[in-house]
Structure formats: C-alpha cells, structure tokens
Image: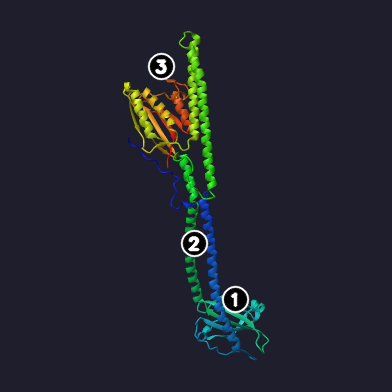
Amino acid sequence: MSDLAEPAPDASSRTPFGWFKRPGRSLTRRLIWLASGWIVLALAITGFFLTSLFQESALRRLGAMLSQTIDELVVATTATPQGVTVAEIRDSQTLRVFSGKYWAVAEPAAEGRLRMVARSTSLWDSDLSVPDDLPPRLNQAFGQTISYNAVGPAGEPLRVAASMKQLPGRNAPVVFLAGIDRSAVDADTRQFATVTWVTLLILGLGLVLAVFIQVKVGLRPLYDLRNEIAAVRKGKAARIARAYPLEIEPLAQQVNRLLDHNQETVERQRTHVGNLAHALKTPIAVMLAEAGTSPGMLPDMVRRQTKVMQDQVDHHLRRARAAARAAHGLGESTPVPEVLDEMAVMLERVFASKGVEIDWRAPDDLTFLGERQDLQEILGNLMENAGKWSKRRVRVSAGPSGLGQMVVVVEDDGPGLPADRREEVLKRGARLDEDAPGSGLGLSIVDDLTRAYGGRVTLADSDMGGLKVVLELPAAGD
C-alpha cells in the first residue's frame, strides 16, 4: 500500500540561533543569558579599567619628565632687580624649534592672568596654552605641580605641568611651565586599548561558548527525563527506566509512582466494569428466557425492552472501558496498517456477496496512541457501516496530521447521507434504515471512543458519491 505524504515540519522548530533569542520561560536560555550578561559586564569593566590604568601610567611617566624639567628651570632661574633671568637649559629638544618639548616662566598679571617672562627656543615666538582657571588653582596648590592637556604651537597634543614657587630675593611668586608632545603616548594608549578589547572579545566569546556547553551538558539529564516522559506519553515506554543525578532522581521516582497509581486505578476500573457487566447481563438473560417465545403483548414488550436494556448496557460498558483505557493510554500504541489490513480482509469476506472492494492506504510507521481493541472497534464500525451502504467500493486513507495527531478518512460509493441527518446518526441508537440489521449504535460507539481519546468525528460528502467520515485520533510519533 502506498504511504500518504509526510506532514509539514513543525513551525516551532528551533533556528540555529534560537538559544540567543529573548530568554522567555526557557531555563536554559535564562541561565545562558544571565551568565553571558555577567561575563560581558565583567569584561567591559576590566577593559575600561586596564585601558585607564595604562593611560594613567603613561601620563605619570610624562609627568615625571615634566617635573624634572621644572626642577631644572627652578635651578636655572634667578631673581634680579630688573626681573627674572633664566640660564640656558642644556636640553637639545628645547633648543630646536617646535621640537615637541617646551618650557616657559611666567608671573601673575592683572585680572588673574599669567605674563610670560621667558620661554624655550623650541616655542619660538609662541606661548604655552594656559587655561583660565590655572592661576587660581596654582594659588590654592602653591608649590605643587598641576598637570593638564593643551595644544602645542604646531597643533600637536601636549601634556603640560605647571607649578607656582617663591624665588629667593623676590616677593612675587613665579610660575614654571613645562610641556611635552603626548602623541606617542596617545598612540600607545590606542594600540593597547585595541589589543585589550580584541583579546577580551575573544575571551568573552570563548567564555559564552563555554557557558553554553556547560549549561547544555549540565541540563542534559533534564532533557533526557523530558524525552523519557514524552516516550511514555507517546506509548513507546511504560515507565521511567534510566538512573538520574541525585537532584533529579526524586522527580523520576515520583513520575513512576504516578504512573503506577494510574495503572492501579485503571485496573480497578476495569475490574468494576467487568463485575458490573456480569451482574447486569445475568438478570437480563433470565428475563429474556422467561419471556421466551410466548405470544402476547406483555412478553413482546418484555422482549423489546430487555433488548433495549441489553443494548444500553453494552453501550455504556463499552464506553466505560474505552474511557478507562484512554485515561490509561500511557505505554499503549497500535500499528494502524495492521488493523486496517485485518479489518479489510475480514469485511471483504463478510460482504463477499456484494463484491465490496476495500482499498486502504496508510504509512507503514503510522501508530495509534491507544489500545488495539479500541482501534479495531472504531475502524471496524466505520468500515462495516461503509461496506453495508456501499455499492461496490470503500476507500480508507490514514496519515499523520502533525502535532501528535493522525487522520483516518473512510468513504464509500453508496447513497450518502443528507446534511440535516448527520448529527442525528451520531446519537445513541439512531439508525438510517429500520429494516437494516443492527442496533444503531455503530457510529455512536465510534463517536464515544473517539471523544474518549480526545479526538473527533466529522461527516461530509465523498467525491465517490457516498458518505465521508473524517476521524481524528492521537498518534504515537517521535
């Protein structure tokens, strides 16, 4: 028999980057996001700290050089009645114009400004840049060195150090300034920052990957437990069999205890149903025997009502057994092709006088999530009803419909069924033809059993000309 087309993939399938979406309710994503967030925050703080530390260290080295230049200036500067004189400092850089190393000597002027009284040859006719707030700061930190950034005469970035001191023989303070090009320091700082951030980025990606692997491996027992429970639900296993870590083992044991409890409950229900069947069938049989074949209105009424009682008892007992089996459900599965082939062979013999041909199609791996007896009763009633009303042909097709469900379609080439009577035939005891044999419970039994398994029955017109019955049932899938 040919298989039906495979169902479309589940829309909920994960993408390769699915784990990096919003955490939502996933424990795995939550752990990965929390760990990754902490790693990113820690590495960012580390990167800023290392870069700032390197820059401060480089600026301190420049500051030490500038302080040395200021000390040399102080030694080379003398106070005279005419003002301040500065002896030449033996530093080749300060003797070369715009060399990148400069010095100047200034004295406080009006309006809180500084007036340059001497400068290095390297400055030529320019002055070192002085911020407006420097003089007040120098007064407050008299004798100490204050450093700041400025722009040199050639447009280069400078690191400048300034200090206000008192010279012997002079009442007014003197301000000594020294500056040096910091372009090399800035370049080293940028290079260090680039190397640091690239290194931290690689380290961060490695740590996030390690966290991902650790979480996936650490939570693997939970995935395995989930898969085992799914296997039990789909009928592939009867209970949890694997050994789990100490933290999860109690959960696995509780699941097995729940399964055992459900099994015991179902067995008790089956026992009660069997006892009830025996208790009711015996009195009914006695009533039928007593009524016998005696003529009269009373015996006829007894026989008719007793037959109705017997049909009702069979119906409700069958429904109770089906509900109990469906509630049990776990660990039970039935291959659909086997049951279809069995029913088709049997019914073709039953309807051999009409020459009914039953054509069925189903995938070899299609499996019903329930007991074989229930599937036999459902398909048997549907196929028997189709064979009874068909002219020559009955067609049965079955296949998965996704989301753990399967669909069985039974069609015939008979007279069909009016739309206004379709709901009626699913009711208990309803019959299309009072002259046809049977109790009228076939489709009702099918509907009850299907609903017990959480499925449904739908009636429609077939393109073969007769009735089409669409049956939805749970399927045991992967």
Residue underneath mark 2: 204
Q: Compute the Cα span from label 2 to label 1.
A: 42 Å
- In-front residue for pair 414/437: 437
- In-front residue for pair 122/93: 93
Residue underneath mark 1: 131
The disc, 3 or 1, on the residue closer to the chain's N-terminal end is: 1
Q: Amino acid at mark 2?
A: Gly
87 sits left or right of 1 in the view: right
Q: What number is the disc on residue 428?
A: none
Q: Determine which quarter of the picture holds residue 478.
A: top left
Give the residue at the far right of this rendering. 171
Crowd band around label 1 with a 10 angstrom C-alpha radius: few (<14), some (14–19), many (20+): few
Q: Determine which quarter of the picture holds residue 379.
A: top left
Q: x, y percentage for residue 428? A: 48, 23
Q: x, y percentage for residue 10? A: 43, 43
Q: x, y percentage for residue 23? A: 52, 51
Residue underneath mark 3: 435
Q: Compute the Cα span from label 3 to label 1.
A: 115 Å
Dot 2 and dot 3 residues touching (CB under 8 Å):
no
For image coordinates 55% across by 46% down, the residue present is 250
Residue 302 vs 97, above or below: the answer is above
Dot 3 and dot 1 residues touching (CB under 8 Å):
no
